[in-house]
Image: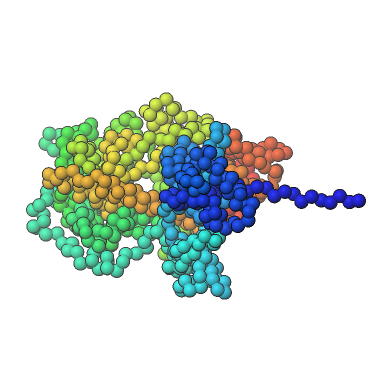
Amino acid sequence: MSKKLRKPEKKEKDFSNKIIKILAQNANKAFNYKQIAAILEVDDTKSRNEIIRDLKILAAQKKVVETEPGKYLVKAISQDYYEGIIDMTGRRTAYFVCPELEEDVFIPTNNLNRALDKDKVKVYVYNRRKGRRPEGEVIEVVERAKTDFVGVIDIQKNFAFVSTANPKMYTDIFIPKDKLGEAEQGDVVLVHIEDWPKRADSPFGSVIKVLGKPGEHDTEIHAILAEYGLPAEFPVEVEVYAQKIDTTINESEIKNRRDMRDTLTFTIDPKDAKDFDDALSFKKLENGNYEIGVHIADVSYYLQEGTILDDEAYQRATSVYLVDRVVPMLPEVLSNFACSLRPREEKYTFSAIFEITEKSQVVNQWFGRTVIFSDQRFSYEETQHIIETKGDIIPEEISITGKSYQVSEEIVNATLKLDKLAKILRRDRMNNGAISFDKVEVKFNLDNEGEPEGVYFKISKDANHLIEEFMLLANKKVAEYIGKQKKTFIYRIHDEPNEDKLIAMQTVIAKFGYKIDFRNKGDISKSLNALLNDVNGKKEQNLIDTLAIRTMSKAKYSTDNIGHYGLAFDYYSHFTSPIRRYPDVMVHRLLQFYLDGGKSVDEEKYEAKCLHSSTMEGLATNAERDSIKYMQVKYMQNHNDQEFLGVISGVTEWGIFVEIIENKCEGMVRIREIKDDYYTFDEKQYALVGATTKALLQLGDEIYVKVKNADLVKKQLDFNFIRRND
């Protein structure tokens, strides 16, 4: 007789988290088990009994309160509920970041409850026992970080879906047929999320702009801007307003300013610069000291508060420097003409004038509005030529970057003296604990169509340092002048390095034979400087430079002055670039207001402006970084038959990241594509280990690779592993 198989018993359901979520979302209302069952849409007796049981357990655990027989309210103040930010991992899971918690809380996929990357959320935290990783569930999305997304549209018969290339956006977006706009199949579009119905797997949205076809140059550049909510052009009314501004230099205004048109003045900028917002003047004084003027475009003279032009500039907060274009903060009539300190033109400026000794000591200073006349415009390359040849240029004509011009002995002597003084300022700054981040910048030679023809590296030399030191001096002294008066001001602050990141960095650099001294703040900065100097020119330089920068806190704007760790300044602000940074405009306005005897302004109001400026700066930086990645992928598309020597710059469980030495392009070799052995990831060694040969592929190893795939939309390179460089 055959034995009858017994059906497995159904496990009891645990409704605890769902009950908590319902009560937390209705914190001021008490619920009984019937109401909870109705919301959960369960009507069987067994489930109702389980809800009754879980309510009593939660009450015993003091997670809910029984306000009257059978009615429950979430505990008003509970240590298990927190507000913070969602940080998606790219694997459909996330971490919850909250300053009140000692560690980030893991959020499994099924507990995200419609939260998206960087959303502000309320989370219930559980599994907080010692030795266990805390986990949580999103109870409420308090505020969306963004509602506009860029993606490729897939149009079906009665609806469409938009999929984004962002690995942290774990869902596509449903588009009803009547909200497609002008979109056609396969277009890159900007969509706005309007709603996310309870029972829907995807949020509902509408197409608000068609950006073009995937892979087309302008489409991808506009997609980068749209992804970060950055404008590609000015509204017509703003352009019209800017065109009507009186930009003439008139005598009545000159009378209100310090007239420095007869003082030797010149600009030094990148060779392809379109706007020149700073100039230096130089005069030797009878007492043997030097009067050095740092002259900054007086943008605030033209940019009046309360106008549509000022509102637009504030919203943008910064210019955006993409590989092939600049998206300016101000319309061209101001940024490239009226405010640009162009050669042989009179300009209104806001200046910091210093009397400086031979030892670069500031013995006198003056701040205020001026009028200047720029005698000449130099590129960094031209100034570097003067410095390197020590002015030994006879006849008095030089030709750098394809341009020939006369250069006077007066300008040569001024340049050499400024270089000498700048070197002393830099030396003193380093001795005080400043950190020297001269990271190599990747630049592209583009043809007339914006296609990359070649890659070159921008390296800071003496000419760059000359300008940098005098700009730093002006920024420091302006901040110091107001800071010591204890008046509300806008500072550029930079906190100390994150110790956990330094420890993690130490683990990596130890593999190359380097170490960091952690004993105190001063030792860390000296140790980092020594490290950056030691790796200069070596294969691991870019990797270690990048790691060092990542250990640093992010610089930001604030009215709360904590100093600038990286520069080793107690006071620091941004005064020198008002054409491209709105905080500098605010600094000019505040400085003039205080020079006129004004009382301290509302700190809370300006702190909000600082937060906005820091946020917009971060978005612009991300867009700039994405444009570089895009151009690197585009460049490598045309070199898919070429072998490249690269350095392993990262190791993960799914493969290795490789940075090509000759052009700094980075891509991934998937672990399954390495055919000479079966490799597994060894986290302790930051290496892939061959199962048979025990051979290692680790950070810093040199290998040869070829391009396997270059994805312009995802801005992603995949490499094939060719061989080791043994």
Q: How is the image coloured?
A: rainbow
Q: Position of residue 588 (x, y in %)?
A: 21, 49
Extreme residue in the right direction: 1
Q: Eyeballing the image, is 279 above or below 244?
A: above
- What residue is shown at x 14% (from left), y 45% (from top)? 598
Residue 275 relative to residue 682: left or right: left
Q: Position of residue 610 (x, y in %)?
A: 30, 47
Q: In this view, does 265 lie to the left or right of 613?
A: left
Q: Which residue is drawn at 22% across and 46% down?
A: 602
Number of numbered callouts drawn: 0
Residue at point 53%, 33% (across, down): 507
Q: Quadrant of the C terminus?
A: top right
Extreme residue toward the front, this view: 69
Q: Is residue 644 above or below residue 694?
A: below
Q: Is residue 47 visible?
A: yes
Q: Is residue 337 visible?
A: no
Residue 171's x, y, as percent? 54, 58
Q: Where is residue 674 in the image (x, y as percent from the top left)?
A: 66, 47
Residue 389's quadrant in the figure?
top left
Viewer-nearest residue: 676 or 196: 196
- Which residue is found at the position 45% from the left and 43% from the top? 75
| Residue 248 shown left or right of residue 405 in the figure | left
